[in-house]
Amino acid sequence: MRGALRWLLPLALAGLLMVAGLLYMQRRAADLFDPAPETIVSASLQGLREQNRLSAFVANYVAVVTASQSRFGLSARRTLIMPGLVRYEVDLARLRAEDVVYDKAAGELRITAPPVEVVGPQIDLTQLREYDGGGLLLRISDTGQQLDAANRRAGQAELLRQARQPVPMSLARDATRRAIERSFALPLRAAALPAEVRVRFPDEPGFPARTIEQMDRSTSLRDVYDTANAATER
């Protein structure tokens, strides 16, 4: 009996070590082929930041401005029609890890995106149209050049004023919101990790109170980065 036990104990120990090794390898394989949502989100964030700027919406506007001037008892008037293209962009380099929070309990990814910026206008000089009423003052002085310069400044300001109106800004935000949501949602779906992606901008209301109550159980990407760096140092 004692001889049998001497053989059985090493075999049992070897069996336990083998089982422990298999369990470890299984967990490592799960980490490699079934990554955590935070890992996927972290990679998506890095990819977005490398794009630097995101332009998801463009719009064309037309400014019609008129300048006039009186000198030497004479008057001159000139009208400019100026089309211009405006881009609405987000500086993705400003998207921080703290702005992306994954709530495992709610199955939600909440993103606070940088503000939408109006870039431009881009003027097509071939499409400019100028009209004046003629007059002696335009022929005997540099009034025409002064009126043109004033109209171009006023035209650019008018294009930006139109671009910043509530309706186009709302359209630009919605387009940008959808683009950012897709950038995060597609990798999660590809990994069979469905999560509702929600995007807000800094001047918009915060996320509803029902989700804020769950923030204590949320994991920020900053925590993911810190954990990864600590593991690397060890």
Image (tube, rainbow, N blue to C red):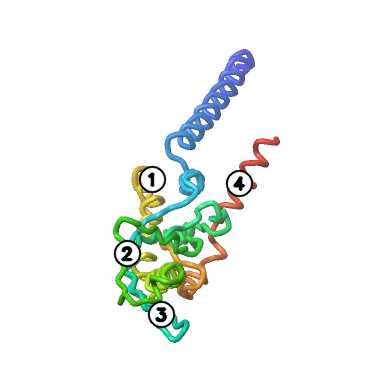
What secondary structure is found at the residue carrying circle 1?
helix
Query: Residue 73 at what x, y percent from top left?
Result: 44, 86
Of the two numbered discs 3 and 1 in the rendering, the one whose residue sits closer to the viewer:
3
Cβ–Cβ below 8 Å for labels 4 and 3? no
User: Dot 1, crowdedness within 10 Å: few (<14), some or many (≥20)?
Assistant: some
Residue 216 figure quarter = bottom right
**Which of marks 1 and 2 precedes in the sequence?**
2
Name the residue that disc number 2 marks. 83
Q: Position of residue 171 (x, y in %)?
A: 33, 67
Where is residue 113 drawn, in percent x and y?
48, 61
Q: Amino acid at mark 3?
A: Ser
Foreground: disc 2 or disc 4: 2
What amino acid is found at the position of numbered circle 4 in the picture?
Answer: Tyr
Identify the mark at residue 187; answer none if there is no mark.
Answer: 1
Tell which circle, 3 or 1, labels the residue nearer the N-terminal end: 3
- Say whether residue 125 is left or right of residue 13: left
Q: First in sequence, mark 4 or 1: give its number.
A: 1
Q: Helix or strand or loop: what does disc 2 sit on?
A: strand
Q: Which of 139 and 86 lies nearest the eye of the viewer? A: 139
For label 3, the residue is: 68
Spatial separation of the CA atoms under disc 4 and disc 3: 61 Å
